[in-house]
Amino acid sequence: MCGPSVLRPEVKEGISAWSVERHAVSSSPFGSDDEIGMLNLITPEISASMLSRADAGRVFDLSVDLFPGMPTWTKGGEPPYQIWMNHTPAGSAVDDPVGVGREQNELVAWSADSISMFTHCGTHIDTLNHFGYHDRIWNNFNTREHLGSTGWTVAGADKLPPLIARGVLLDVARALDVDVLPDSFVIGAEELEMTVSRQGTQIQVGDVVMVRTGRGATWSDPEKYLPREPGIDRAGAIWLAKRGAAMVGADNIALERLPSSDPENWLPAHTYLLAEAGVPIMEVMDLEEIAEEELYESCYLGASLKLRGATAGPVRPLAFPLTD
């Protein structure tokens, strides 16, 4: 297993988790203009190696489908996902929206729709401007200089590069012999250590690590998916970040255990990973199929929407089995 004790000193220097200060934002080891944090650990060599080993004949979709009434975060007054029709074949024949007359509208059956959604809706990547401490985010960008009227000018979803990396599934639910972890179950360092041991999995620097709680199997039922989430705590987040995880994902809506057990911080894993360790977060993943296949190592491929300045980028991640 690739633990903190076996990382070379020069590798540790590139991993912010080894030099953080609790409840304080960190400066990037990749320079004062860095906006993607530990995603820099995914080197071109890692990407090329993963692509060369990927079995393109099989692909696993790690994203959920979006639908009205789906589970989503609305506790702060955020809008639920909505979709509506702008044009229908019969309606266009009546309304003639483009002025071509009934005959053409009856010939050309036109349908079109629009959506409205919270950027943290469905499968998405939390960017490094999503959470910080006081008036600062990762790499000491501050609200006075970098937050405009409509959004951040730094560290937004538009800055996230397309990612090709080694994907690692940590199936904590299966390691504990359950289908779904109990409500508000804490995944700490001990549970992660036990999971990699049972799977025979190694965490390597630059990995995209995906934690399965089992909640993904309940995606179509908000009453089962949302309440009292199992997930990692700060100690679990530290365990992953110190091993060089470039990004940490999970199959629940908040990644971390809810409600928080930290009386000082209602989202301690978020603030630690994003503001202190510089590790982006991926949420609401569908990990059921790769868990069933016991695909603990894969070629991960994903690119988020380039929403300028946004605190999250919707993404459709894919996993390819490896040929060796």
Image: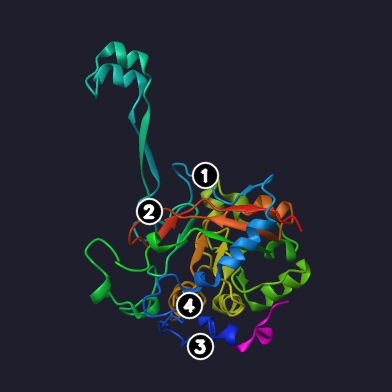
The N terminus lies in quadrant: bottom right
Left or right: where does residue 319 sit relative to residue 292? Answer: left
Q: Secondary structure at mark 1?
A: loop
Q: Nearer the viewer, mark 3 or mark 2?
A: 3
Kindly check if marks 3 and 1 are in contact, taking CB atoms under 8 A apart as contact: no
**Element type at mark 3:** helix
Q: Tell me the quadrant of the picture where the C terminus can be found.
A: bottom right
Cβ atoms at labels 2 and 4 below 8 Å apart: no
Q: Amino acid at mark 2?
A: Phe
Residue 82: x and y in percent read 38, 43
> Looking at numbered disc 4 in the image, what kind of residue is underneath it?
Tyr
Is 64 covered by the magenta stretch?
Answer: no
Ranked by sequence position, the earlier of labels 4 and 3 is 3
Relative to 97, is 265 above or below?
A: below
Q: Residue at x 24, y 20 (%)?
A: 96
Q: Is residue 5 magenta?
A: yes
Residue 272 circle label: 4
The answer to the question of whether label 4 and label 1 lie on touching residues, with beta carbons closer than 8 A, is no
Identify residue for label 3: 19
Query: Which region of the structure is painted magenta?
Result: 1-9
The three-letter code of the residue at mark 3 reads Ser
Percent position (x, y) of residue 168?
65, 64
Q: Where in the figure is residue 152, as x and y percent of width and height?
A: 30, 66
Foreground mark, 3 or 1, reads: 3
Q: Earlier in the sequence, mark 3 or mark 2?
A: 3
Structural distance between the alpha carbons of marks 4 and 1: 29 Å
Q: Find the distance from the CA under tag 2 to the CA under tag 1.
A: 15 Å
Does residue 132 sit above or below 75 in this rendering? Answer: below
Closer to the camera: disc 4 or disc 3? 3
Residue for badge 1: 65
